[in-house]
Amino acid sequence: MKKYLFIFLLLLSAGSTFAQADTSIKLLREIPGEYSDFTVDNLGNIFLLDQTNQLKKLSPEGDSIAVYSNATSFGTVYSIDASNPMKVLLYYRDFSTIVVLDRLLNPRNTIDLRKLNIFQAKAICQSYDNAAWVYDEGEAKLKRIGDDGSLIDQTGDLRLQLEEAPSPEWMEDNDRLVYLYDSARGLLVFDYYGTLKSKIAFLGWQDFQVVGKYIIGRKGALLERYQLSSLSLQERSLPA
């Protein structure tokens, strides 16, 4: 069975727009193919990972820009972070390895987390200073890793602030905060020093993303948007 990527335009500028019916969601195009994962950078470029672990970069219009075909060097790609348009992180969880690509998907370097004794890292993301955040589940610490594989900084043991250690499936650095999402425990928001700022019981969310002042996720056929400052949650049904 073919799997398709459907590109929608979602208007989120006003709260009333989000809460309205499906008139604010428009199908722009379909990209046929069999994909295991995809992501989009903040310039609208589309990154597609097919079932052979080949990574393709398309322009917002769907034109091919670059291809990275050596993605099987460390097994299966577990996650893609393209939040920095000039730098793409491929994370291979089975080998605890991060491959850093440039904007044309040329390999820049490889970070072997095992050399830092990090063997249990379920989630990684790009950091504010062009390094990488890694959540070390073995030590329950957020660690900032440089492109050269060095440990730049780390937080204290997060279990001291929580009843149990999180096991995040997704991480993002946005506006001086680090967001960790664990679908079984909810959303945890930390500052750069590892201080817990917020704990929100959003369970079972998928396709998490921080967009400006909003946290957006999908729960089944519902698209939900949460604003930290006002504690307001809005949801709407996605079109069939």
Image (cartoon, rainbow, N blue to C red):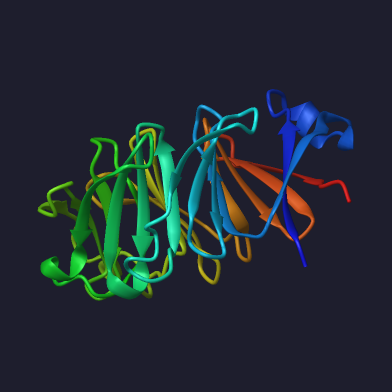
Question: Residue drawn at (37%, 75%), measured in percent from left and top?
Answer: 164
Whether residue 159 is visible to the viewer of this picture, yes or no, is: yes
Question: Residue drawn at (18%, 46%), measured in percent from left and top?
Answer: 147
Question: Residue drawn at (17%, 71%), measured in percent from left and top?
Answer: 114
Q: How many marks?
A: 0
Q: In the rendered image of this protein, does residue 91 appear above or below residue 104?
A: below
Is 190 on the left-hand or right-hand side of 151? right
Image spot of residue 173 (x, y percent): 37, 42
- Residue extending farthest top: 13
Image spot of residue 170 (x, y percent): 46, 58
Closer to the camera in the image, 136 or 195 = 136
Image spot of residue 26 (x, y percent): 82, 32
Q: In the rendered image of this protein, does residue 68 appear above or below residue 128?
A: below
Rendering quarter of residue 11:
top right
Q: In the rendered image of this protein, does residue 31 appear above or below residue 85?
A: below
Quadrant housing the N terminus: bottom right
Closer to the camera in the image, 187 or 83 = 83
Is 233 on the left-hand or right-hand side of 131? right
Closer to the camera in the image, 216 or 26 = 26
Whether residue 123 is visible to the viewer of this picture, yes or no, is: no
Question: Residue drawn at (29%, 48%), measured in percent from left and top?
Answer: 100
Image spot of residue 75 (x, y percent): 38, 71
Is 96 on the left-hand or right-hand side of 76? left
Closer to the camera in the image, 191 or 4 = 4
Rendering quarter of residue 9:
top right
